Image (tube, rainbow, N blue to C red):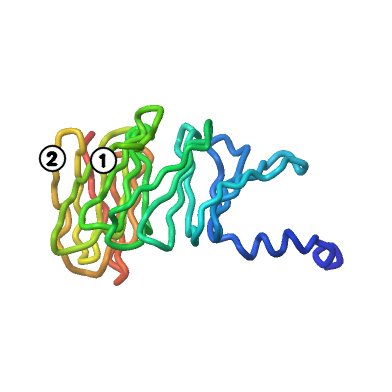
Amino acid sequence: MSNCRKRPKRWSAYVLAANHLCFSPDSYRIAVAHYGGVTLCATRSADATPVPLACPGSHLSVTWSPNARFVLSAMQEDCLRGWRLEDNDDLVMSGYATKVTSWSWFNGGRYLATSGSNCAPCWPFKGRKGPRACAPETPGDNQSALVTAVAGDPAHPILGIGYDDGQVTVADIQSGQEVIIKPPGDGAVTSMAWSPNSAWLAFGTDKGFTGLFPVSG
């Protein structure tokens, strides 16, 4: 107990202000989302200076791109903010109907799929500039429901999309093919995940309904 009481006040305040934490792919750094932006901290050096990525507003969650070149945050506003770390170039991804509460990197990190709209915007990260000046792919367009959960196959361009009316769709963003694997009903989809071998897609709703769907490679 005595050691806890002796912690510097600046660390206590910092922890209380954090909204979300995310390790870099190599675990050498951690990104902290908070009001006013995102801060990058080294995990293996107590003397390293934190790197601030400033942006006004409340940042609710944060993610690293799989190649560690980009850091993205979901904000209280209906948008994403991002930074290309090699030159601190900042990105704004907007056009959402509501806050982004679910996102997923997939297809080898080439895309970031997101919730928050009537479709599942998939921002391209294939090139050096990321999504700058690029429009997202928009699979799963549904004019009667909002996307509440997404889960992308890590190795393939296949995306699971869940909606607030309970529908679940699987989309191939390269071929444009889409299949509804669960019709509306049983509550809003709140969680989705792929099996490690990409053979199964699991999903659950806020009313306790769960499903497991086989997906052929």
Query: Looking at the picture, which amino acid does disc 2 mark?
Result: Gln
Q: Residue at x 71, y 39 (%)?
A: 44
Q: Front-most of 73 and 182?
A: 73
Whether residue 84 is situated above or below residue 118 in the rendered picture: above
Residue at mark 1 to residue at mark 2: CA–CA distance? 19 Å
Q: Which of the numbered marks, if any, corresponds to residue 135?
A: 1
Callout 1 crowding tier (Cα within 10 Å): few <14, some 14–19, many ≥20: few
Which residue position holds label 2? 177
Looking at marks 1 and 2 on the same chain, the residue that comes earlier in the sequence is marked by: 1
Label 2 crowd (10 A; few <14 / some 14-19 / many >=20): few
Q: Quadrant of the N terminus?
A: bottom right
Q: Quadrant of residue 8?
A: bottom right
Quarter occupied by residue 78:
bottom left
Looking at this view, name the residue that lies furthest to the bottom: 207
Q: Residue 199, how many percent across, how many down?
A: 28, 40
Q: Nearer the viewer, residue 209 or 53?
A: 53
Disc 1, SS: loop
- Residue ID at (46%, 51%): 73
Amino acid type at image mark 1 = Ala
